[in-house]
């Protein structure tokens, strides 16, 4: 399998829950496995997390686990027949106080506050925007509407308000319980749905810290940008997080499909500038839910995210419920590799006019610059926290980065970083011994061989987080 810089996040579901298939998917290129907490019970997720760890061990590769919280998904209630078909022009009532099952004339609401948050002429989008209704009037708990764009509406489909403006909190009681579950199996990443401000992310971090206090585990937090209100506060949310997800589904429903491509590019650029990771998600290979090959438009979509510098591309229903989960991973890996091979490199321009105030960050940038101009075979970072590898990965470079750490949690976290291959190695506390051990390990793995030049960074004293203060250029004997 050719080396690939862009990482692949795959969602686990009924289609990919066979342990042997999951192992094949990891071998084919999955770097991060997403557990979708919108479905399943706590024990289901604990069991699946164990299955992921076991499959990764059999495949001889470490993967990260991302727990994706459901968040305040605002939904219609249930229908007597499971679904109705709405016709354009018809009247339809959504009633927060309705207790009986829905019918062609109306349905109940899971989100009881909705009648207080809409007004006449507001546009509501149901089922990911496939159905559009206009608010005529709000009488008590009942929202009277006219269907503008009809279609099939089934149980518990989501509701969005065009332009945003719904006040549901980002973290629900269920999310708080789910955070405790995720910390029970030490999820490496926690994705927070629908954050509107930095406060939402700070609260999630506190909840994770409390839930994982006994194990001293610290997951990385991903903010899913999917609310219109999050756009003007994107930088604030980003700085309170370890990364963001370009969640193009709900975001497109709220701001309109046409706005999403430019927002995606802006988010990827902003994340890289602020040393945060970024995942591009939703419908990337949608046709492969039912077809064994992607469309050319999907190939271009994935490739463009790669060319813009996304850390990871994500598969949702394609691997959770599709007919071809393994084939989808294989196709996505091919597209990423091809896009990277043809990408334009402007590494020197990244450093123009920039100053670095931290020694460890300066060491990381020096390693990139030197390795690029020397034509080094590899860049190697001996790292405790993963920070040096993260900084290196923010810049597009053809030289592969190998991050050597003695901590499994750090290794798993770094599986998300673009162009970083994290390796577990138990090194000496003595600097010279550790450097020699690193080279022996690199040779054993056939990463370098006699005559190759590589750059290596480390810190003294060894094992101190954020302490990289040495760059050495080595030629393999």
Image (cartoon, rainbow, N blue to C red):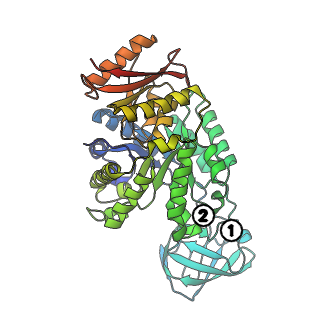
Q: CA distance from mark 2 to mark 1?
A: 9 Å
Q: Which of 223 and 384 lies nearest the eye of the viewer?
A: 384
| Residue 34 makes an appearance in the image | yes
Taking the spot 49% from the left edge, 24% from the top edge, the residue there is 384
Quarter of the figure with residue 110: bottom right
232 versus 353 height, above or below: below
- Circle 2 packing at 10 Å, graded few (<14), some (14-19), many (20+), is many
Q: Is residue 204 left or right of residue 422?
A: right
State the residue position of label 1.
114
469 versus 189 height, above or below: above
Q: Which of 177 and 74 lies nearest the eye of the viewer?
A: 74
Do the CB atoms of the residues marked 2 and 1 lie less than 8 Å apart?
Answer: yes
Which of pointers 2 and 1 lies earlier in the amino acid sequence? 2
State the residue position of label 2.
74
Task: Classify the position of the N terminus by image quarter.
Answer: top left
Q: What is the x, y in percent for residue 23?
A: 29, 41
Task: Classify the position of the C terminus by image quarter.
Answer: top left
Taking the spot 43% from the left edge, 39% from the top edge, the residue there is 64
Q: What is the x, y in percent for residue 135?
A: 66, 80
Q: What is the x, y in percent for residue 349?
A: 49, 44
| Residue 186 makes an appearance in the image | no
Q: What is the x, y in percent for residue 339?
A: 34, 53
Taking the spot 48% from the left edge, 30% from the top edge, the residue there is 366
Q: Secondary structure at mark 2?
A: loop
83 versus 279 height, above or below: below
């Amino acid at each position: 399998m050719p080396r690939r810089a862009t990482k692949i996040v795959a969602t686990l579901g009924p289609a990919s829950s066979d342990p042997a298939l999951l192992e094949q998917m990891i071998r084919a290129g999955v770097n991060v496995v997403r557990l979708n907490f919108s479905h399943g019970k706590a024990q289901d997720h604990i069991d699946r997390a164990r299955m992921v760890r076991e499959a990764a061990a059999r495949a001889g590769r470490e993967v990260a686990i991302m727990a994706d919280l459901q968040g305040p998904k605002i939904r219609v209630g249930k229908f007597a027949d499971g679904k109705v078909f709405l016709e354009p022009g018809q009247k339809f009532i959504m009633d927060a106080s309705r207790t009986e099952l829905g019918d062609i004339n109306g349905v109940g609401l899971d989100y009881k506050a909705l009648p207080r948050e809409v007004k006449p002429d507001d546009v509501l989008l149901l089922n990911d925007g496939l159905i559009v209704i206009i608010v005529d009037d709000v009488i008590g708990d009942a929202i009277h509407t006219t269907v503008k764009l009809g279609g099939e509406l089934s149980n518990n489909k989501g509701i969005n308000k065009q332009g945003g403006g719904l006040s549901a909190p980002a973290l629900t009681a269920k999310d708080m319980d789910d955070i405790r579950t995720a910390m029970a199996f030490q999820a490496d990443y926690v994705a927070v749905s629908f954050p509107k401000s930095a406060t939402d992310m700070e609260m999630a971090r506190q909840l994770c810290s409390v839930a994982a206090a006994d194990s001293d585990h610290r997951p990385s937090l991903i903010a899913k940008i999917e609310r219109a209100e999050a756009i003007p506060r994107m930088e604030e949310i980003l700085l309170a997080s370890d990364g963001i997800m370009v969640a193009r589904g709900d975001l497109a429903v709220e701001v309109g499909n046409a706005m999403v491509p430019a927002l995606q590019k802006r988010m990827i650029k902003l994340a890289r500038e602020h040393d945060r990771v970024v995942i591009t998600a939703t419908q990337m290979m949608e046709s492969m839910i039912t077809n064994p090959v992607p469309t050319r438009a999907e190939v271009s979509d994935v490739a463009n995210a790669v060319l813009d510098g996304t850390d990871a591309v994500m598969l949702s229903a394609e691997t959770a419920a599709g007919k071809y989960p393994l084939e989808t991973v294989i196709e996505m890996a091919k597209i990423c590799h091809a896009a990277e091979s043809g990408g334009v490199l402007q590494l020197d321009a990244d450093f123009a006019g920039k100053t670095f105030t931290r020694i460890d960050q300066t060491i990381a940038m020096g390693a990139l610059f030197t390795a690029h101009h020397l034509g080094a075979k590899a860049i190697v970072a001996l790292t405790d926290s993963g920070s040096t590898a993260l900084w290196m990965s923010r810049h597009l470079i053809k030289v592969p980065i190998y991050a050597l750490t003695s901590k499994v949690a750090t290794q798993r976290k770094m599986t998300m970083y673009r162009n970083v291959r994290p390796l577990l190695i138990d090194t000496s506390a003595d600097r010279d011994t550790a450097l020699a051990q690193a080279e022996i390990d690199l040779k054993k793995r056939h990463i370098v061989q006699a005559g190759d030049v590589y750059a290596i960074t480390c810190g003294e004293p060894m094992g101190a987080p954020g302490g990289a203060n040495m760059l050495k250029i080595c030629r393999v004997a």
